[in-house]
Image: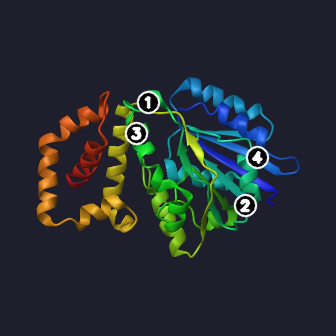
Amino acid sequence: MKNQLSILIPVYNYDCTSLVDGLCRQIPVGVEAEIIIADDGSTDEISQSRNAALADRPRCRYIRHQQNVGRAAIRNFLAQSSRYEWLLFLDCDMQLPHSHFVSNYLADSGDSVTDGGFGVCENEAAATHNLRYRYEWSSQSRHTVAQRRAHPYRSFRTTNFMIRRDIMMSHPFDERFVHYGYEDVLFGKTLEQAGIDIRHIDNAMMLSDLETNNVFVAKTEESLRTLYLFRDDLRGYSRLLDAAEHANGFVRWALRLWHRMTGRLERCNLCGQHPNLTIFKLYKIGYYLTL
């Protein structure tokens, strides 16, 4: 059983008090552990104040950056700030699935990188009107342990994973990725090229906090711009990129034309009360092809 653990949580405009309190209760007796919360230039004073108060908890440290440095750099910073052999990275807006989440990681036999997975809390109220919920719920079959193990590097996500500190220090996140999206995809590719195993287990963190449709669509657009910018690095590791590049010239032309004609209407649907997942797929590839 592993007996040293640094739990690392990047946060931006989100109150992670509940998550940290839950993690504190789960650390077994005899395990050397710390929880580091790194605020990446939050602008919301309420969540910032509540997160800062976590520094008073045993084993907790709170570090605030005045400027937003980006999703890759903040994770590298957290790794550099850590003290222990094993690093557990968690997204701040997730929910612990059960009381033995931390113990499952400590007991796992993986000796390099372990991805615990990602799930969605069932929410009937969000099932019809929340795009993020509908998208993640429909995608769950791709995130099972069996599916992730079939494609261990392409399935890697930064939401919830453990990595040996020396591996993280020698293979940091690419800090060119300042804006939202795909830094985890390139990290998976980096590990594969380095011959470092990723072990996938059933220890999923759960998504319960859902952004509005407007926010989710804007984040999706930002991630597509990131994908376009780093398309040479990500080729073969993104299904959307592969689909866009393997389509013949006429199909690409037709999708561009369709997006230019209907993109605004599609976006209105996606930001409205009854977003359609088929329209979401068309909007994404059309948006990418018109960049």
| Secondary structure state at the residue bearing disc 4 | strand
Q: Is residue 8 above or below residue 251?
A: above
Which label number is shown at residue 134?
Answer: 3
Task: Give yes or no for contact between labels 3 and 1 (Cβ–Cβ under 8 Å).
Answer: yes
| Residue tagged 4 | 34
For the point 37% across and 61% down, the residue is 238
Give the label, 1 or 4, closer to the camera: 1
Q: Compare residues 287 and 36 and report the one nearer the observer.
A: 287
Which label number is shown at residue 108?
Answer: 2
Give the label, 2 or 1, closer to the camera: 1
Give the label, 2 or 3, closer to the camera: 3
Q: Which tag, 1 or 4, sits closer to the chain's start? A: 4
Q: CA distance from mark 2 to mark 1?
A: 34 Å
274 left or right of 11 in image? left
Task: Give yes or no for contact between labels 2 and 1 (Cβ–Cβ under 8 Å).
Answer: no
Q: Position of residue 60 (x, y in %)?
A: 75, 40
Q: Which tag, 3 or 1, sits closer to the chain's start? A: 1
Q: Quadrant of residue 165?
A: bottom right
For the point 44% across and 44% down, the residue is 136
Task: Give yes or no for contact between labels 1 and 4 (Cβ–Cβ under 8 Å).
Answer: no
- How crowded is the residue under tag 4: few (<14 C-alpha within 10 Å), some, or many (20+)? many
28 left or right of 141 in image? right
- How crowded is the residue under tag 1: few (<14 C-alpha within 10 Å), some, or many (20+)? some
Q: Compare residues 275 and 28 and report the one nearer the observer.
A: 275
| Residue tagged 1 | 126
